[in-house]
Amino acid sequence: MTESKGFASSSVPRHLARGVLGFGALVAAFALVPRYGPITLLLAPLALPALRGCPTCWTIGLVQTISHGRVRRECADDRCELRLAPRE
C-alpha cells in the first residue's frame, strides 16, 4: 500500500520557491491596484497553482515536505500514533 504525498513537494527549496511565487503574486495583485488599477487583480488566480489552492494548503505541504520520510504513522488496535522513522 502506497502513502499519498498530499500537498508535499519533492524538496524543501522547491516548496519554498512555490511559496515565494504564490505569495508574491497575491501581494502584487493587491498592492499594485492603486497604481495600475483593478487589472492587477488578474495576478491573484496565478497564485492558486503555486500555493496548491490556498495559503493553508501550501503551509500543510511545507510541513509534509519537511517531515517526509522522518515520521511514520503506526496503527494498531484502533489507535494510531506518529513515530520517528528508524535511521538507516
Image (cartoon, rainbow, N blue to C red):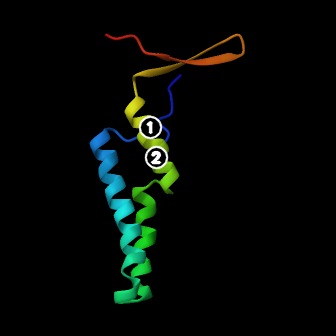
Q: Quadrant of residue 61?
A: top left
Tell me the element at label 1: helix
Per the model, the C-alpha gap separating discs 1 and 2 is 6 Å
Question: Camera-side residue: 4 or 75?
Answer: 75
Q: Is residue 46 above or below residue 67?
A: below
Tell me the element at label 2: helix
Q: Position of residue 67 (x, y in %)?
A: 41, 29
Question: Camera-side residue: 61 or 27?
Answer: 27
Whether tag 1 and tag 2 are in contact, CB under 8 A, the answer is yes
Q: Which residue is mark 2?
A: 59
The quarter of the picture where the C terminus appears is: top left
Q: Which residue is mark 1?
A: 63
Residue 38: in sight, yes or no?
yes
Q: Quadrant of residue 39?
A: bottom left
**Rendered residue at 44%/37% (across/down):** 63
Disc 1 packing (10 Å; few <14; some 14–19; many ≥20)? few
Disc 2 packing (10 Å; few <14; some 14–19; many ≥20)? some
Q: Is residue 21 left or right of residue 4?
A: left
Q: Identify which amino acid the numbered label 2 is placed on.
A: Thr
Q: Position of residue 8 (x, y in %)?
A: 42, 40
